[in-house]
Structures are given as C-alpha cells and as structure tokens.
Image (spheres, rainbow, N blue to C red):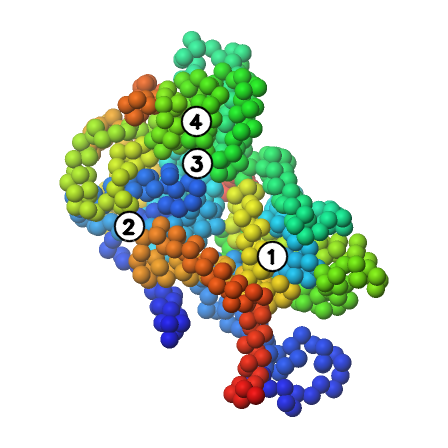
Amino acid sequence: MKMTKLAATLAATMVVAGPTLADTLHFPSLSYRTGPFAAGGIPFADGYSDYLTLINERDGGIGGVPIRQTECETAYNTERGVECYQSIRNDNPLVLQPLSTGITYQLIPRTMEDGIPMHTMGYGRTSAVNGEVFNWTFNYPANYWDGASVIINYLLDENDGSLEGKKIALLYHNSAYGREPIPTLTRLGETHGYELVTIGVDSPGQEQGSQWLQIRRERPDYVVMWGWGVMNPTAIQEAANIRFPMENFIGVWWSGSQQDVRPVGSGAHGYKALAMHGTGMDYPIYDDMQQYVIDAGKYAGTGDEVGTVLYSRGMYAAMLAVEAAKKAQEIHGVAAITPAMMRDGMANLEITEELMAELGLPNFGPAFSVACENHGGSGAAMIQQWDAEAGEWNLITDWIEPDRDLIMEMAMDDSLAYAAENDITPACLN
Amino acid sequence: MLYREAGDYKTSYVADSQTFPIKFDRYGYYILLGFAFLVMPLIINDYWANSIVVPFLIYAIAALGLNILIGYCGQLSLGTGGFMAVGAYASYKMMTAFPDLNIIFVIIIAGMVTACVGVLFGLPSLRIKGFYLAVATLAAQFFLIWLFTRTAWFYNYSPTGMISAPTREIFGVPVTGPRASAVSMYMICLCFLVASAWLARNLTRGSLGRTWMAIRDMDIAAEIIGVNPLIAKLTAFAVSSFLVGISGALLFTVYLGAAEAGEAFGIDKSFLVLFMVIIGGLGSIFGAFAGAAFLIVGPVLLKLLLVNSLGWPTDLAAHLEIMIVGALIIVFLIVEPHGIAALWRTIKEKLRLWPFPY
C-alpha cells in the first residue's frame, strides 16, 4: 500500500514536471545550500531571492508582471548542475546564474543552443566578454582577468609603479575557477617584471600544509588567492600560523567574505580582498528590505545573512537581472518578456550612478554599460580590508580600473579559438 | 507458476546453456530490449533522458566493468574514477586530434587506451591482494587525476584545464555537443550498454570467466589446477578497465559535454561505482544494472518527490536525500547482504513455486 502511494506520487511528479505559467517572469536560482561550498552558496542564494521577493512585494513584480522564483540544488557539482538545467530549460527561465565556473563551462554551449541568457557575475568564462562569439553569456560588471589586473594595478600603486624583482605567489583552487587568472598574471608578469609562482590547492582545500610550506620556502612578497568555500579560512589560518604579513595577502572577491575571515579570529586582521560592490547595511534599500521582506517573514533561508558580503553580491546579481528585465520590457514594449527578449535587455543594459541611487544602492557598484562587443562591463573593483576587532570589511581604495586593453586582446584570442573549435561565426545578434 | 520450467525441454547443448534458459525470462528479456530500442525513443522526453536514463545507462557500463574485476575476479579496486578519467581524456584527445574520426571508434579506442592503463596498474595485483591492492589502486586514482590536472597536453593547453566535447555526428545526427537530441544520446548509450552487457555476460561464462572465478575463490588452488594468475588477473583488469573507460568517455562526450578531472572523476566517483557493485550484487550482470539504477535513479526520483511534488526547501531535500539513500543502503545490506541481485534470485525461486509453496 505504501509502495503504491509512493509510486502514485512519483507518477504524478512525472506528469506535472514542467508546468509553464506564461503570466509570470521565471527567475531560477541554481543554488548550493549543501556540500563543501555551502558557506558561500547560502548567503548568495538568500540575497538573490530576497531582492526578487522585495520587487514582488513592493512593486508587484517587474512592469506589473510578478516574478516566479524556483530553486534547484546543485551542491556545486557539475552533474547536478546539468540535471538542474534540464529541469528548468523548458520553463522559460529568463536568466541563469549558476555561481560555479565548472557549471558555467558546461552550460555555455547548451544555453547558446537553447537560447537562454546566462549571467556569470564575477566568475565563469572570462572570454565571454566577447559578445560576438558568446551571444548568450554575460559576465558584467567584472571578470577574473579584470580582478587579476586590478590586484596588480593596486600593487603597482603600492610600490610606486614598479614590481620589478618582486615575487608574487598565486594560491589557487585547483579547478577551472582557480586556473582562470593564471594567463593574465603570467602576461602581466612579463610586462611588469615580477616573478609569478603558482601553487594549486586541490578541492575542497582543507589540506594546505605543503602549499604553505612552499610559500615559506619561496618567500613571496605577496600572496594572491583564488579560493572558494572551505579553502579560504584554511588558507588565512595557515597564513596566520606562519606569520605571513596579512596586508600582503590579497584574495579575489570570492575569498573576501565574513565566512572566510571570522573563523581565524584576530589572526585575520589586515587581510585584503577585492570588492566588486559595496557591503554592509548602510544603504537605503535595506529600509525597504526590512519592511517588505524581513519583517514580513518572507526572507529566504534563515535570514541571518542579511548585509554580509555574499548576501550583497546575490542582491546585486538580482538587481542587475531585474534592471535587464526592465530594459527588455522597454525595448520590446511587452511586459511578459521571453528569454530572447531578456537577452536583448542584458545586451543593452546601462547602469548609471543615478540609477543606482534611485534603487537605494548609491555607489554600491560601478557605473557601466553593456554592448555586443563588450559583455563584461567596466571591470573595475575596489580593495577591502578586514578589521578583526570591529568585525567588518573596510573599503581602502576607490574603484581601480583594470588593464582592459590587454584583457580584451587576450579575451579576443581565446574567444576566437573557441569560435573556430565550435564552428561559430562571430556576429552580433541584434 | 510464473517461472514454469515444465514442458520447456532443451534438445541441444546450445539451448541448455543459453543466458536465459527459462522461457519466461527469455521473452521478458526480448520484450525489454524491444521496449528499450523501439518504444523508449518515441516516448522519452528531454528531462527524463538527460537527467535519469542517460546517466543510468552510462553508470551501468562502469558498474559492469567494476563487477568483472571485483565480483568475478575478486580484485578490489578503488581506481574507477581515475580510469573513467582516462577514458574521458583519451576520447577528448582523439576527438580534437582526429576531427573526422567517427565517435563510435573514438569511444572504443578510448576504452582500449584505458584497458592498457588498467593493465599497467593491475600489475601490482600479482603480488598484493585484498586491502593492500585497494590501496595500490587508490594510488592509481590520485596519480591519474594529478596527471590530468597538471599536464597541459591532456587538456590541449586550455587556460582553465577544462575539456569540452565538440559536436560529432553519426549518420548526420549529432550525438555529442549541445545540438545532440535526447533520443540520439539515449540511443548511443543504450547501444554501448547492450554491447557491453553482452560482452561481459559471454566473457564471464566462458573459459576466461571461469579462470577469473577460480582466482577469486582460491588463487592457490586455481594455480595448482593450471590457471595462470598473470593472465587471469591482467585480463580481468583489461576488460574491466575497457568497460570503465567506455563509460568515462560516454560520460564526458555525451552526458557532461565539459569536464575537469578533479571535479568530475574524483575519488567519490570510485566509491559511487563501488557502492553500485556492492549494492547490486557482486558477480552478477543484473546486479550492475540494479546497483546503477538504485544509486543514480533513486536520488533523482527522491528529489523530484520532495522538491517538485511536496514543495520542500531544496537544502532540506538535499540533506534528506543523502540520509534516505544512506539508510536504504544499510537496510539493503542487512536484509540482503549479497545485493539486489540475490534478492531477485530469491524472488525468482519463490515465483517458481507460487502459488503452491511446497
């Protein structure tokens, strides 16, 4: 009897799989709230979901059409990511944000074929900035190569314009994600004369004894980290253990959240990381957020991540998605937009400082515009530093511009190689 | 009652030694094959093919391969993930180096390359046994993944170390890459699975399979009666790795489309396939299918039930899924230590007498 009930429910599941509701805007979230990377996945997913909830509750959706959210658990695992993609692809997903470089690589060809836009904000395939090859993939406002270049530009600034004879170690997550910055750092090393030492950490990164032994032996002037998940606090702890000067230890924006530094306590004081957007609750939007989402009990998850770095990032990603949807509605004059219209909205997105202020997020992110030839936005980022006593991240620089000419040149080579491999004729869609 | 042998006379040795000697089984098998080849392609939808059926078919090949090594030859191996990676990277190198080579040959050659690598890592099995061999094959797992992540030649010097499968066609129908339809992916995996199962079944019941089983049951006795342990063990490693390599190649080219060694073929893959073999039943072809179905289809169905039907939060469902599958594994091993295949055998015995128990 029990079995028949179970079988009946399963059978019902098969029939129901894939309902389409045309009068809503479907924003799926490929999140990971389990597995070794959950510490980063949870706040991002919460922020993404809360902002969309806010738009629904406060504005009644985008252009009067309510947002429909779905969530699929990937556990940062590429196989589950593919399963999630298959389960939503026929459900008119407006934009995919997998928050995993590995899953991004898998979905790029599929989304191109299916005509579904994908936004990989600050991760994914860097050469997707060339929108003539990657028509459906966007990585504004900044990508890994921008991040690497911003770090080098910051260090140049610190060292009076010359890194000649310096030694920089790159501690990276040994996956597609962590390997992304290596070509840029190598190229920039040729220009600026520093020596690059690359040290890989195998996923998930709890074991870093030998890597830090190597860092001790090599005595680098700076350590740059491309880490994620449990790798970050472990690395910061190891650095504190060998008394590596924390102000010379700089992480990418995925290695600079509260979860990464808090476990190390006072040892993490002075650790720096890139910031692609502002952090904290000092933005007017949080008044609305409090009123419509948090006090109303409509928050995602447990609601204790509000205002953290990765929560802000999830919120920023949702904000950019909503603005792109508005742009799409404006271009096509239709409220119930399709994924293809959404793509046009993303390809013509323009974020100005006035717009950010109007949304209640003044100076939160850079002003940038997207075009077919440039899906990557401005690429600028700030540097933030951890204050262990106060328990907060402080921005210590203004927006730092990357070496965009070099990055565009490298991205062009890489994307054209991809186009040749996959028989794509580079062209703009609109 | 259902499994009636009465009136089912065999008049030749060939008839007596066929795979399915009982008529009911045989017709069931024909109907299943007919259903898989003729009906499934018409009714399967994209989601079912891509999320459930194709991974099941691919992992069933891997489980078949590992079952030959562990179940039939008694050599414990934890290197399955590494061997799958060999198959995947071999197929990637073949696809990019010879773009005109038919994908079927690419996958078969990838299997052969894996067989060679498997024999190489099988050499220690001549000196060490049991848990010690498991450790040696574990070394193979870590070494192979290390090799594929550190040697740029294997991923054609791509900056990220990811390999991605270009589109390849059979008779003008794309079977790999983003343009491949669900049906074409299903069909190529099905063909490879049926061929692998046929190969495995016929090898294991022939003289080669008997030497494997002799080694498994007692290697010294086997040596005394004239079984060459060198040949028996190394052929088991070769055939097993061949099938595992094919499954790795299919997983990368057909299913994933893009992969990186550490993430897609890590140690958890080795354990996944090992659990399939143990839960399905050691030394049984049917067991490989049952184990793969249990561990691949089970979690997805559970997810569909909890998230899509009952509307539970995804993280709760994911945690519950791990707990339920874990509990089911324990329950299965307590209730039927010899796996689902043994359960099936018991059911068959009972059905043979049903409805008259004596």
Same subunit, labels 4 and 2: the answer reads yes
Secondary structure of the residue carrying tag 2 is strand
Query: Could you tell me how far apart the alpha carbons at marks 1 and 3 are, in whole angstroms?
Result: 31 Å
Residue A322 point in image, percent of width and height: 26, 41
Q: Is residue B48 visible?
A: yes
Query: Within 10 angstroms of label 4, few (less than 14), some, or many (20 or more) residues?
Result: many
Q: Chain of mark 2?
A: A
Query: At x 76% / y 80%, what residue is drawn?
Result: B13
Mark 4: secondary structure: helix
Q: Amino acid at mark 1?
A: Ala
- Badge 2 crowding class, 10 Å Cα cut-off, few under 14, some 14 to 19, many 20 or more, is some
Q: Earlier in the sequence, mark 4 or mark 3?
A: 3
The answer to whether residue A402 of the structure is visible from this angle is: no
Query: Same chain for marks 3 and 2?
Result: yes
Residue closest to the eye, B51 or B92? B51
How far is mark 3 from mark 2, CA to CA?
28 Å
Callout 2 amino acid: Gln
Along the line of sight, the residue nearer the viewer: A256 or A329: A256
Quadrant of image for the N terminus of chain A: bottom left
Pair 1/3: label in front = 3
Chain of the residue that carries numbered disc 4 in the rendered image = A
Return the chain for callout 1: B
Q: Which residue is mark 2?
A: A69
Image quarter in which the C terminus of chain A is found: top left
Q: Which residue is mark 1?
A: B62
Quarter of the image for residue A237 reads top left
The answer to whether the residues at label 1 and label 3 have Cβ atoms under 8 Å apart is no
- Inspect the image, locate mark 4, and give the three-letter code of the amino acid beneath it: Ile
- Please give the residue where the numbered disc 3 appears in the rendered image: A230
